[in-house]
Amino acid sequence: MRVLLTGGAGFIGRHVLAELMRRGHDVRVMDSLRNDVHRDGQAWSPPRGAAFLTGDVRDAQVLGTALAGIDAVVHLAAKVGLGVDIGDMPDYASSNDAGTAVLLAAMARTGVSRLTLASSMVVYGEGFGLCPEHGSVRPAPRLEASLATGNFEPPCPHCGRPLGTTLVVEDTPFDPRNAYATSKVAQEFYASNWARVTGGAVAMMRYHNVYGPGMPRDTPYAGVAAIFTSALRNGQAPKVFEDGRQRRDFVHVRDVAAATVAACERQTSGVTAFNVGSGTPRTVGEMAEALARALDGPAPVVTGQYRLGDVRHITADSSRLRTELGWQPVVDFNEGMAELAHLGEEGAAPSPLRAAMATR
Ligand code: UD1
Protein backbone atom coordinates (compact mmCIF):
# COMPACT_ATOMS: atom_id res chain seq x y z
CA MET A 1 0.00 0.00 0.00
CA ARG A 2 0.99 3.62 -0.39
CA VAL A 3 0.84 5.03 3.12
CA LEU A 4 1.09 8.63 4.34
CA LEU A 5 2.62 8.62 7.82
CA THR A 6 2.24 11.91 9.70
CA GLY A 7 4.60 12.45 12.63
CA GLY A 8 6.94 9.86 11.14
CA ALA A 9 10.03 11.60 12.57
CA GLY A 10 8.82 11.18 16.14
CA PHE A 11 9.40 8.49 18.76
CA ILE A 12 6.59 6.11 17.82
CA GLY A 13 6.56 7.35 14.22
CA ARG A 14 10.09 6.21 13.45
CA HIS A 15 9.29 2.71 14.67
CA VAL A 16 6.02 2.65 12.68
CA LEU A 17 7.96 3.80 9.62
CA ALA A 18 10.45 0.96 10.03
CA GLU A 19 7.64 -1.58 10.44
CA LEU A 20 5.69 -0.28 7.42
CA MET A 21 8.81 -0.54 5.28
CA ARG A 22 9.65 -3.98 6.66
CA ARG A 23 6.18 -5.08 5.54
CA GLY A 24 6.79 -3.79 2.03
CA HIS A 25 4.66 -0.65 2.05
CA ASP A 26 5.52 2.44 0.08
CA VAL A 27 5.75 5.19 2.73
CA ARG A 28 5.60 8.96 2.51
CA VAL A 29 6.43 10.68 5.80
CA MET A 30 5.07 14.10 6.64
CA ASP A 31 6.40 15.81 9.76
CA SER A 32 6.62 19.44 10.80
CA LEU A 33 9.81 18.82 12.84
CA ARG A 34 8.29 21.10 15.45
CA ASN A 35 10.72 23.12 17.56
CA ASP A 36 9.62 21.90 20.97
CA VAL A 37 10.48 18.37 19.86
CA HIS A 38 13.23 18.66 17.29
CA ARG A 39 15.27 21.16 19.22
CA ASP A 40 18.18 23.19 17.89
CA GLY A 41 16.65 22.94 14.44
CA GLN A 42 18.02 19.43 14.23
CA ALA A 43 17.36 17.97 10.82
CA TRP A 44 15.90 14.52 10.38
CA SER A 45 16.21 12.45 7.28
CA PRO A 46 14.18 9.38 6.52
CA PRO A 47 15.72 5.98 5.86
CA ARG A 48 16.49 5.15 2.26
CA GLY A 49 13.35 4.20 0.38
CA ALA A 50 10.92 6.46 2.25
CA ALA A 51 9.79 9.81 0.87
CA PHE A 52 9.75 12.82 3.20
CA LEU A 53 7.83 16.06 3.17
CA THR A 54 8.35 18.71 5.83
CA GLY A 55 4.97 20.15 6.66
CA ASP A 56 2.30 20.74 9.24
CA VAL A 57 -1.01 18.88 9.03
CA ARG A 58 -2.80 22.21 9.50
CA ASP A 59 -1.51 23.24 6.08
CA ALA A 60 -4.13 22.12 3.54
CA GLN A 61 -1.87 22.95 0.61
CA VAL A 62 0.99 20.69 1.73
CA LEU A 63 -1.58 18.00 2.47
CA GLY A 64 -2.82 18.13 -1.11
CA THR A 65 0.67 17.10 -2.25
CA ALA A 66 1.18 14.66 0.60
CA LEU A 67 -2.06 12.78 -0.08
CA ALA A 68 -1.65 12.41 -3.86
CA GLY A 69 -1.79 8.72 -4.79
CA ILE A 70 -2.09 7.56 -1.15
CA ASP A 71 -4.20 4.52 -0.10
CA ALA A 72 -4.13 4.92 3.70
CA VAL A 73 -3.06 7.44 6.32
CA VAL A 74 -1.42 6.72 9.69
CA HIS A 75 -1.86 9.92 11.68
CA LEU A 76 0.59 10.22 14.56
CA ALA A 77 1.55 13.91 14.31
CA ALA A 78 0.50 15.57 17.56
CA LYS A 79 1.55 17.59 20.54
CA VAL A 80 2.13 14.91 23.18
CA GLY A 81 2.57 14.58 26.95
CA LEU A 82 0.46 16.10 29.67
CA GLY A 83 1.65 19.64 29.01
CA VAL A 84 3.53 21.98 31.27
CA ASP A 85 0.68 24.25 32.29
CA ILE A 86 -2.68 25.57 31.18
CA GLY A 87 -0.93 27.85 28.69
CA ASP A 88 -0.38 24.72 26.55
CA MET A 89 -4.11 24.35 25.97
CA PRO A 90 -4.43 26.34 22.72
CA ASP A 91 -1.53 24.40 21.20
CA TYR A 92 -3.16 21.05 22.01
CA ALA A 93 -6.42 22.24 20.44
CA SER A 94 -4.68 23.64 17.39
CA SER A 95 -2.01 20.98 16.74
CA ASN A 96 -4.16 17.97 17.54
CA ASP A 97 -7.76 18.91 16.82
CA ALA A 98 -7.56 21.58 14.14
CA GLY A 99 -4.73 19.53 12.58
CA THR A 100 -6.87 16.39 12.43
CA ALA A 101 -9.86 18.31 11.08
CA VAL A 102 -7.77 19.79 8.24
CA LEU A 103 -6.31 16.35 7.47
CA LEU A 104 -9.75 14.69 7.38
CA ALA A 105 -11.14 17.37 5.07
CA ALA A 106 -8.15 16.91 2.75
CA MET A 107 -8.62 13.12 2.79
CA ALA A 108 -12.29 13.58 1.82
CA ARG A 109 -11.25 15.91 -1.02
CA THR A 110 -8.64 13.54 -2.37
CA GLY A 111 -10.66 10.34 -1.84
CA VAL A 112 -8.37 8.69 0.73
CA SER A 113 -10.67 6.52 2.83
CA ARG A 114 -8.52 4.68 5.41
CA LEU A 115 -7.17 6.18 8.61
CA THR A 116 -5.23 4.80 11.57
CA LEU A 117 -5.23 7.36 14.37
CA ALA A 118 -2.97 7.63 17.40
CA SER A 119 -5.13 8.00 20.49
CA SER A 120 -4.34 7.31 24.13
CA MET A 121 -5.43 5.51 27.26
CA VAL A 122 -5.78 8.94 28.87
CA VAL A 123 -9.19 9.27 27.20
CA TYR A 124 -10.58 7.07 30.00
CA GLY A 125 -9.29 9.21 32.87
CA GLU A 126 -9.25 7.10 36.02
CA GLY A 127 -11.26 4.32 34.38
CA PHE A 128 -13.34 2.24 36.78
CA GLY A 129 -12.77 0.71 40.19
CA LEU A 130 -14.55 -2.11 41.98
CA CYS A 131 -16.34 -1.30 45.24
CA PRO A 132 -17.32 -4.26 47.46
CA GLU A 133 -20.72 -2.63 47.99
CA HIS A 134 -21.41 -0.55 44.84
CA GLY A 135 -19.76 -2.67 42.18
CA SER A 136 -18.08 -0.97 39.24
CA VAL A 137 -17.76 2.78 39.95
CA ARG A 138 -15.97 5.72 38.45
CA PRO A 139 -13.51 7.23 40.96
CA ALA A 140 -13.75 11.00 41.39
CA PRO A 141 -10.61 13.10 40.77
CA ARG A 142 -8.32 12.78 43.79
CA LEU A 143 -8.32 15.66 46.26
CA GLU A 144 -5.10 17.46 47.02
CA ALA A 145 -5.84 17.17 50.74
CA SER A 146 -5.89 13.35 50.42
CA LEU A 147 -2.70 13.20 48.36
CA ALA A 148 -0.89 15.51 50.78
CA THR A 149 -1.63 13.09 53.62
CA GLY A 150 -0.47 10.06 51.64
CA ASN A 151 -3.93 8.76 50.73
CA PHE A 152 -3.26 7.96 47.12
CA GLU A 153 -5.98 5.42 46.31
CA PRO A 154 -9.12 7.05 44.92
CA PRO A 155 -12.07 5.95 47.09
CA CYS A 156 -15.54 4.81 46.09
CA PRO A 157 -17.49 8.02 45.32
CA HIS A 158 -20.52 6.62 47.20
CA CYS A 159 -19.13 5.11 50.40
CA GLY A 160 -15.46 6.10 50.49
CA ARG A 161 -14.20 2.50 50.65
CA PRO A 162 -11.01 1.52 48.86
CA LEU A 163 -11.55 0.23 45.32
CA GLY A 164 -10.24 -2.87 43.63
CA THR A 165 -8.96 -2.45 40.08
CA THR A 166 -10.37 -3.53 36.74
CA LEU A 167 -9.07 -3.45 33.18
CA VAL A 168 -10.75 -0.82 31.01
CA VAL A 169 -12.35 -2.01 27.79
CA GLU A 170 -12.84 0.11 24.70
CA ASP A 171 -16.47 1.04 25.35
CA THR A 172 -15.64 2.64 28.71
CA PRO A 173 -17.03 6.20 28.62
CA PHE A 174 -14.51 8.98 28.08
CA ASP A 175 -13.36 11.05 31.05
CA PRO A 176 -10.51 13.25 29.80
CA ARG A 177 -8.79 15.05 32.68
CA ASN A 178 -6.31 17.32 30.93
CA ALA A 179 -5.91 19.23 27.67
CA TYR A 180 -3.98 16.44 25.95
CA ALA A 181 -6.62 13.85 26.84
CA THR A 182 -9.37 16.22 25.72
CA SER A 183 -7.63 16.77 22.39
CA LYS A 184 -7.39 12.98 21.85
CA VAL A 185 -11.12 12.54 22.57
CA ALA A 186 -11.93 15.32 20.10
CA GLN A 187 -9.67 13.74 17.46
CA GLU A 188 -11.57 10.48 17.83
CA PHE A 189 -14.92 12.21 17.43
CA TYR A 190 -13.77 14.15 14.36
CA ALA A 191 -12.53 10.92 12.81
CA SER A 192 -15.85 9.14 13.53
CA ASN A 193 -17.80 12.05 12.02
CA TRP A 194 -15.60 11.89 8.92
CA ALA A 195 -16.07 8.12 8.61
CA ARG A 196 -19.84 8.40 8.87
CA VAL A 197 -20.09 11.05 6.19
CA THR A 198 -17.50 9.70 3.75
CA GLY A 199 -17.84 5.94 4.37
CA GLY A 200 -14.18 5.89 5.43
CA ALA A 201 -12.56 3.40 7.83
CA VAL A 202 -10.86 4.37 11.09
CA ALA A 203 -8.80 2.46 13.65
CA MET A 204 -8.24 4.46 16.84
CA MET A 205 -5.14 3.20 18.61
CA ARG A 206 -5.38 3.96 22.33
CA TYR A 207 -1.76 3.61 23.29
CA HIS A 208 -0.77 2.76 26.83
CA ASN A 209 2.58 3.87 28.32
CA VAL A 210 4.91 3.39 25.38
CA TYR A 211 8.62 2.94 26.09
CA GLY A 212 11.70 1.87 24.17
CA PRO A 213 14.63 3.07 22.09
CA GLY A 214 14.45 6.68 20.97
CA MET A 215 12.12 7.64 23.81
CA PRO A 216 12.13 11.39 24.46
CA ARG A 217 14.13 12.28 27.56
CA ASP A 218 15.20 15.71 28.55
CA THR A 219 11.98 17.50 27.79
CA PRO A 220 9.10 18.55 30.06
CA TYR A 221 7.01 15.93 28.26
CA ALA A 222 9.22 12.91 28.97
CA GLY A 223 7.52 9.75 30.27
CA VAL A 224 8.51 8.16 33.55
CA ALA A 225 10.67 5.35 32.10
CA ALA A 226 12.86 7.93 30.32
CA ILE A 227 13.09 10.10 33.45
CA PHE A 228 14.23 7.13 35.54
CA THR A 229 16.77 6.04 32.93
CA SER A 230 18.28 9.54 32.79
CA ALA A 231 18.55 9.65 36.60
CA LEU A 232 20.21 6.22 36.77
CA ARG A 233 22.67 7.13 34.04
CA ASN A 234 23.69 10.11 36.15
CA GLY A 235 24.22 7.83 39.13
CA GLN A 236 21.05 9.01 40.87
CA ALA A 237 18.22 6.95 42.32
CA PRO A 238 14.92 7.08 40.42
CA LYS A 239 12.42 9.18 42.35
CA VAL A 240 9.17 7.27 42.52
CA PHE A 241 6.15 9.44 43.26
CA GLU A 242 3.25 8.55 45.58
CA ASP A 243 3.87 5.15 47.17
CA GLY A 244 5.12 3.54 43.95
CA ARG A 245 2.11 1.22 43.78
CA GLN A 246 0.30 3.12 41.00
CA ARG A 247 -0.23 0.80 38.05
CA ARG A 248 0.41 1.29 34.36
CA ASP A 249 0.83 -1.00 31.37
CA PHE A 250 4.26 -0.39 29.85
CA VAL A 251 4.18 -1.49 26.23
CA HIS A 252 7.26 -1.62 24.02
CA VAL A 253 7.40 0.73 21.06
CA ARG A 254 8.14 -2.09 18.58
CA ASP A 255 4.99 -3.90 19.74
CA VAL A 256 3.08 -0.63 19.37
CA ALA A 257 4.44 -0.20 15.85
CA ALA A 258 3.39 -3.74 14.92
CA ALA A 259 -0.13 -3.11 16.28
CA THR A 260 -0.40 0.16 14.37
CA VAL A 261 0.66 -1.39 11.07
CA ALA A 262 -1.68 -4.38 11.60
CA ALA A 263 -4.56 -1.92 12.05
CA CYS A 264 -3.50 0.08 8.99
CA GLU A 265 -3.50 -3.08 6.91
CA ARG A 266 -6.67 -4.65 8.24
CA GLN A 267 -9.11 -1.89 9.19
CA THR A 268 -10.80 -1.60 5.81
CA SER A 269 -14.28 -0.55 6.96
CA GLY A 270 -16.07 0.94 9.95
CA VAL A 271 -14.73 2.61 13.07
CA THR A 272 -12.97 0.57 15.76
CA ALA A 273 -11.03 1.56 18.86
CA PHE A 274 -8.20 -0.65 20.08
CA ASN A 275 -6.51 -0.50 23.48
CA VAL A 276 -2.81 -1.03 22.92
CA GLY A 277 -1.12 -2.47 26.00
CA SER A 278 1.03 -5.46 26.86
CA GLY A 279 -1.79 -6.94 28.94
CA THR A 280 0.40 -7.15 32.04
CA PRO A 281 0.03 -4.15 34.36
CA ARG A 282 3.07 -3.18 36.48
CA THR A 283 3.56 -0.71 39.25
CA VAL A 284 5.73 2.34 38.68
CA GLY A 285 7.87 1.07 41.58
CA GLU A 286 8.43 -2.28 39.80
CA MET A 287 9.42 -0.46 36.65
CA ALA A 288 11.94 1.67 38.56
CA GLU A 289 13.41 -1.49 40.09
CA ALA A 290 13.74 -3.18 36.68
CA LEU A 291 15.67 -0.19 35.32
CA ALA A 292 17.86 0.10 38.42
CA ARG A 293 18.70 -3.61 38.13
CA ALA A 294 19.50 -3.33 34.45
CA LEU A 295 21.89 -0.42 35.04
CA ASP A 296 23.20 -1.77 38.33
CA GLY A 297 22.30 1.62 39.79
CA PRO A 298 21.03 2.92 43.12
CA ALA A 299 17.75 1.50 44.40
CA PRO A 300 14.65 3.60 43.67
CA VAL A 301 13.49 6.05 46.33
CA VAL A 302 9.77 6.31 47.01
CA THR A 303 9.26 10.03 47.69
CA GLY A 304 5.56 10.40 48.46
CA GLN A 305 5.54 13.40 46.08
CA TYR A 306 2.57 13.65 43.76
CA ARG A 307 1.31 15.52 40.71
CA LEU A 308 -2.27 16.70 40.92
CA GLY A 309 -2.99 15.85 37.27
CA ASP A 310 -1.90 12.22 37.59
CA VAL A 311 -4.43 9.44 37.68
CA ARG A 312 -3.73 6.60 40.08
CA HIS A 313 -4.09 3.50 37.92
CA ILE A 314 -4.62 3.08 34.19
CA THR A 315 -4.67 -0.46 32.92
CA ALA A 316 -6.24 -1.66 29.74
CA ASP A 317 -7.81 -4.79 28.41
CA SER A 318 -6.10 -5.12 25.02
CA SER A 319 -7.74 -8.40 24.02
CA ARG A 320 -9.67 -6.86 21.10
CA LEU A 321 -6.38 -6.14 19.37
CA ARG A 322 -5.36 -9.76 19.83
CA THR A 323 -8.59 -11.32 18.69
CA GLU A 324 -9.49 -8.96 15.84
CA LEU A 325 -6.07 -8.15 14.44
CA GLY A 326 -4.13 -11.23 15.51
CA TRP A 327 -1.55 -9.03 17.27
CA GLN A 328 0.65 -10.32 20.10
CA PRO A 329 3.21 -8.32 22.06
CA VAL A 330 6.60 -9.99 21.79
CA VAL A 331 8.91 -7.86 23.94
CA ASP A 332 9.33 -9.14 27.49
CA PHE A 333 9.06 -6.40 30.16
CA ASN A 334 12.44 -7.01 31.82
CA GLU A 335 14.23 -7.40 28.50
CA GLY A 336 12.57 -4.29 27.12
CA MET A 337 13.53 -2.24 30.16
CA ALA A 338 17.11 -3.53 30.00
CA GLU A 339 17.26 -2.54 26.34
CA LEU A 340 15.94 0.95 27.17
CA ALA A 341 18.48 1.29 29.95
CA HIS A 342 21.41 0.37 27.73
CA LEU A 343 20.40 1.49 24.26
CA GLY A 344 17.59 3.92 24.94
CA GLU A 345 19.21 7.02 23.68
CA GLU A 346 21.63 6.23 20.92
CA GLY A 347 21.16 2.48 20.41
CA ALA A 348 18.48 1.16 18.15
CA ALA A 349 16.97 4.61 17.77
CA PRO A 350 17.08 5.66 14.16
CA SER A 351 18.16 9.21 15.12
CA PRO A 352 19.32 10.95 18.28
CA LEU A 353 17.46 12.00 21.36
CA ARG A 354 16.38 15.41 20.33
CA ALA A 355 14.59 14.16 17.27
CA ALA A 356 12.57 11.80 19.35
CA MET A 357 9.25 13.32 20.22
CA ALA A 358 6.74 14.14 17.54
CA THR A 359 4.02 11.59 17.92
CA ARG A 360 1.24 10.37 20.10
C1 UD1 B 1 1.57 8.55 29.78
C2 UD1 B 1 1.97 9.51 28.69
C3 UD1 B 1 0.75 10.01 27.97
C4 UD1 B 1 -0.02 8.81 27.47
C5 UD1 B 1 -0.37 7.90 28.63
C6 UD1 B 1 -1.10 6.66 28.14
C7 UD1 B 1 4.01 10.84 28.95
C8 UD1 B 1 4.64 12.04 29.59
N1 UD1 B 1 2.71 10.63 29.26
O1 UD1 B 1 0.89 9.24 30.84
O2 UD1 B 1 1.12 10.84 26.89
O3 UD1 B 1 -1.16 9.25 26.79
O4 UD1 B 1 0.80 7.49 29.28
O5 UD1 B 1 -1.43 5.83 29.19
O6 UD1 B 1 4.62 10.12 28.20
N2 UD1 B 1 6.23 9.36 38.02
C9 UD1 B 1 7.20 9.12 39.00
N3 UD1 B 1 8.36 9.82 38.94
C10 UD1 B 1 8.65 10.75 37.99
C11 UD1 B 1 7.67 10.98 36.98
C12 UD1 B 1 6.48 10.27 37.03
O7 UD1 B 1 6.99 8.29 39.88
O8 UD1 B 1 9.74 11.33 38.01
C13 UD1 B 1 4.96 8.60 38.07
C14 UD1 B 1 3.73 9.50 37.92
O9 UD1 B 1 3.35 10.02 39.17
C15 UD1 B 1 2.71 8.52 37.36
C16 UD1 B 1 3.56 7.52 36.54
O10 UD1 B 1 4.90 7.73 36.96
O11 UD1 B 1 2.07 7.82 38.40
C17 UD1 B 1 3.47 7.69 35.03
O12 UD1 B 1 3.75 9.04 34.67
P1 UD1 B 1 4.04 9.49 33.16
O13 UD1 B 1 5.15 8.72 32.57
O14 UD1 B 1 4.15 10.98 33.17
O15 UD1 B 1 2.80 9.00 32.32
P2 UD1 B 1 1.22 8.91 32.37
O16 UD1 B 1 0.60 9.97 33.21
O17 UD1 B 1 0.90 7.51 32.71
Image (cartoon, rainbow, N blue to C red):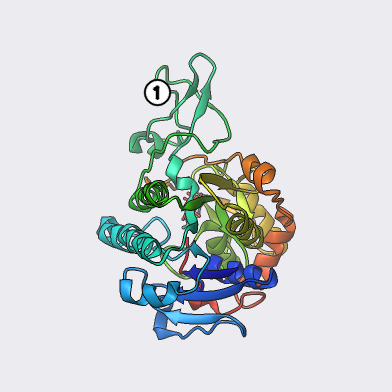
Residue 330 can be seen, yes or no = yes
Horizontal placement of 304 versus 86: left or right?
Answer: right
**Residue at x 68% of width, y 42% of height:** 323
Tell me the amino acid under the disc marked 1: Pro
Q: Nearer the viewer, residue 161 or 14?
A: 14
* Residue 106: image location, x then y, percent: 36, 65
Residue 227, above or below 181: below
Say whether mark 1 is within 8 Å of ligand 1.
no
**Residue at x 52% of width, y 76% of height:** 28
Residue 120, above or below 232: above
> Under tag 1, what secondary structure?
loop
Residue tagged 1? 157
Where does the N terminus fall, quadrant-wise? bottom right
* Residue 305: image location, x then y, percent: 44, 48
**Residue that protrudes farthest toward the top in the picture:** 133
Q: Residues within 10 Å of mark 1 (few under 14, many from 20)?
A: some
Q: Nearer the viewer, residue 332 or 236?
A: 332
Question: How many numbered marks have been drawn onto this rendered protein structure?
Answer: 1
* Residue 318: image location, x then y, percent: 62, 43
Horizontal placement of 55 versus 9: left or right?
Answer: left
Q: Nearer the viewer, residue 24 or 75?
A: 24
Residue 108 lies in quadrant: bottom left
* Residue 359: image location, x then y, percent: 47, 65
Residue 338 lies in quadrant: bottom right
Residue 49, above or below 201: below
Residue 235 can be seen, yes or no = no
